[in-house]
Image: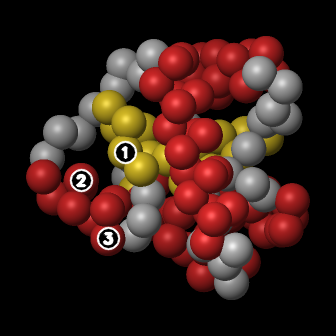
Amino acid sequence: ALVVDNEPAILEGMTLLLDGWGTTARTANSVGEALKTGVELGARLDIVLADYHLHRDDGLLMIQSLRARLGRRVPAVLITADRSREVQEQAQTADVVVLRKPVKPAALRAAMARVLATAEAAE
C-alpha cells in the first residue's frame, strides 16, 4: 500500500495500522514523492491511500497522475475532511472511494477490501 499524507503523525499511525493487518505500507508526504515511490513500486503497487489536501496539491489528481504513469487503474481510497459534493463527484468519476475524516480503522479496512475486490473482479 502507498500511503500519502503531508502529516508525519498520520503516516506513522497508518503505517502501524496497516502493518498490524499484515499490509506493507510505503509512505510519501508529497505528490512528487508519491509519484516517485508509486512508479518504483510499479506492478507491486496494490492500493493507494491518499489524503485529499496535500499542501497546495490535490490527492485525487495525484492518484490520476500515478495511474496514467503506470498505465493501469491502481485501486485507491481518498481520505478527506472535505464534504463537498464536487469532491465526491470527482472521486466517483475517477473510480476512487472516498472516506471522510476522522477515519475509523474498521471503515478503512472495509473500504480497502471493497476497492481491492472490485479491482480483482475487473481483471
Query: First in sequence: mark 1 or mark 2?
Result: 2
- Which residue does the numbered mark 3 point to in the structure image? 93
Residue contact between numbered discs 3 and 1, judged by CB atoms under 8 Å: no
Q: Position of residue 57 (x, y in %)?
A: 42, 56
Residue contact between numbered discs 3 and 2, judged by CB atoms under 8 Å: no
What residue is shown at x 79% (from left), y 15% (from top)? 20
Q: Position of residue 123 (x, y in %)?
A: 70, 74
- Which residue does the numbered mark 2 point to in the structure image? 88
Query: First in sequence: mark 3 or mark 2?
Result: 2
What residue is shown at x 32% (from left), y 70% (from top)? 93
What residue is shown at x 18% (from left), y 39% (from top)? 83
For the question of whether residue 53 can be seen, the reply is no
> For the residue labelled by badge 2, is the local secondary structure a helix, a strand or a loop?
helix
Q: Which mark is residue 98?
A: 1
Query: First in sequence: mark 3 or mark 1?
Result: 3
> For the residue labelled by badge 3, is the local secondary structure a helix, a strand or a loop?
helix
Relative to 65, residue 57 above or below: above
Amino acid type at circle 2 is: Gln
